[in-house]
Amino acid sequence: MLLLAVGVPTAYNDYRPSDEQTWVAIVWTIGGCLLVTIGFVGSYLLFADVLDQSLLVASVGAYLVVFGSVLALLQARQRSNKPLP
């Protein structure tokens, strides 16, 4: 929930193109939420079921994996000067 409530809006404010249209903002936000949700659930299941970790470790691990991955992706896109979709 923290990733969706804080991470996606923060990433949107920091990394979005400055001259975008409304539909681009909607797609960017929904896409970010889907990416974070799928990444978190997948990472959580990996930690909890496959690696047989406790639920706390699985939650923290999934958060760190998704947060770090998305931040690295956004930084790489920003450095390459390619506009975000």
Image (tube, rainbow, N blue to C red):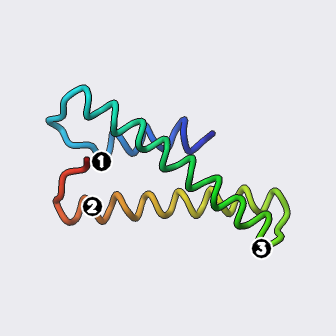
Give the camera-side residue of 50 and 3.
Answer: 50
Is label 2 in contact with label 1 (beta carbons under 8 Å)? yes
Mark 2–mark 3 distance (CA, rounded to whole Å)? 31 Å
Q: Which residue is mark 3?
A: 51
The first of marks 2 and 3 along the sequence is 3
- Of residue 24 and residue 11, the one placed in the foreground of this image is 24
Q: Residues within 10 Å of mark 2 (few under 14, many from 20)?
A: some
Residue at 48% in and 50% down? 35
Image location of residue 43, percent across then percent down: 64, 61
Q: What is the number of the mark on residue 15? A: 1
Q: Is residue 48 above or below residue 29?
A: below
What amino acid is at disc 2?
Arg
Q: Residue at left 76%, top 71%?
A: 50
Image quadrant for the N terminus?
A: top right
The crowd level at tag 3 (other Cα within 10 Å; few <14, some 14-19, many 20+) is: few
Res 77 label? 2
Residue lying at 72% horizontally and 60% vertically, measured from the top left: 45
Indicate the position of residue 79 as horizontal and vertical percent values. 22, 64
Q: Earlier in the sequence, mark 2 or mark 1?
A: 1
Residue 56: x and y, percent? 80, 57
Residue type pointed to by label 1? Tyr
Amino acid carrying label 3: it is: Leu
Residue reaching furthest to the bottom: 51
Q: Nearer the viewer, mark 2 or mark 3?
A: 3
Q: Is residue 2 above or below residue 78?
A: above
Query: Counting residues from the N terminus, which is met first, the one under dot 3 or under dot 1?
Result: 1
- Image check: 38 left or right of 85? right
Query: Looking at the image, which residue is at 33% across and 36% down?
Result: 27
Numbered label attached to residue 39: none
| Residue 80, quarter of the rendered image | bottom left
Q: Give residue 62's position: percent from left, percent from top.
A: 65, 59
Secondary structure state at the residue bearing disc 2: helix
